[in-house]
Amino acid sequence: MSKIPDLGGPLYPQLGPGVEKYRRLARKGLAKMAREDRYAYGEAVELAILSLQRRELDRETKTPDRRNEPLGDARLKMLRNQLLAWPDQERRARSEVEWKSMYDAAMAEKRKAAEAKPVARRKRSWTAKKAAWCAGQALKRA
């Protein structure tokens, strides 16, 4: 049985020659690369991943015979309904015990936040200040 060689990190798909160039440089260590090369490496990886995601999305949203025809309205409506129904499926899958523990945790967090927050003294409005001053003046006259 042959041992799989350790490449020093997770395996990623082939992202193109631009990324491969920087991967070769990075094998010696990112710290040894020039700052500009590190930034260029990051940009190359980001562009390659976005391109890969775009291709995957295009592949998923086209008809099975790959004629690059977009999905029909019925299929898009079905996908949209599936996405909208997902939260309800999640809720139904939870048991009473899970709901109770989630509620207890949320309330404990809320109580802790309320205890930690200092009670701020409300500032009196200008009209309240004037009313207090007028009341004080009336008491002085009496």
Image (spheres, rainbow, N blue to C red):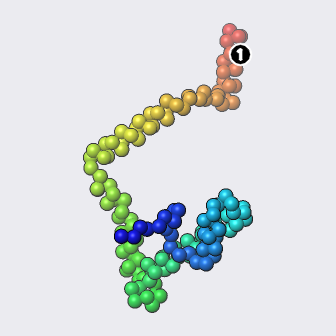
Q: Which residue is mark 1?
A: 137
Total marks in image: 1
Q: Looking at the image, which residue sits at the far front? A: 1
Q: Which sits in the foreground, 69 or 120?
A: 69
Residue at (56%, 29%) from the top-left corner?
118
Q: Quadrant of the C terminus?
A: top right
Q: Which sits in the foreground, 130 or 35?
A: 35
Q: Quadrant of the N terminus?
A: bottom left
Q: Position of residue 106 (x, y in %)?
A: 41, 41
Quadrant in which residue 39 is drawn: bottom right
Residue at (45%, 37%) from the top-left corner?
110
Residue at (39%, 65%) from the top-left corner?
84
Q: Looking at the image, which residue sits at the far left? A: 96
Instruction: Specify whether 136 is left or right of 102.
Output: right
Q: Position of residue 8 (x, y in %)?
A: 53, 62
- Say if residue 140 shows up in the picture: yes
**Above or below 65: residue 58:** above
Q: Secondary structure at mark 1?
A: helix
Q: Which sits in the foreground, 3 or 32?
A: 3
**Above or below 137: residue 83:** below
Q: Looking at the image, which residue sits at the far top? A: 142
Quadrant in which residue 85 is drawn: bottom left
Q: Residues within 10 Å of mark 1 (few under 14, many from 20)?
A: few
**Above or below 35: residue 107:** above
Instruction: Specify whether 107 is left or right of 48.
Output: left
Q: Position of residue 99 (x, y in %)?
A: 31, 46
Amino acid at circle 1: Gln
Residue at (38%, 73%) from the top-left corner?
79
Instruction: Specify whether 5 is left or right of 85.
Output: right
- Say if residue 47 shows up in the picture: no
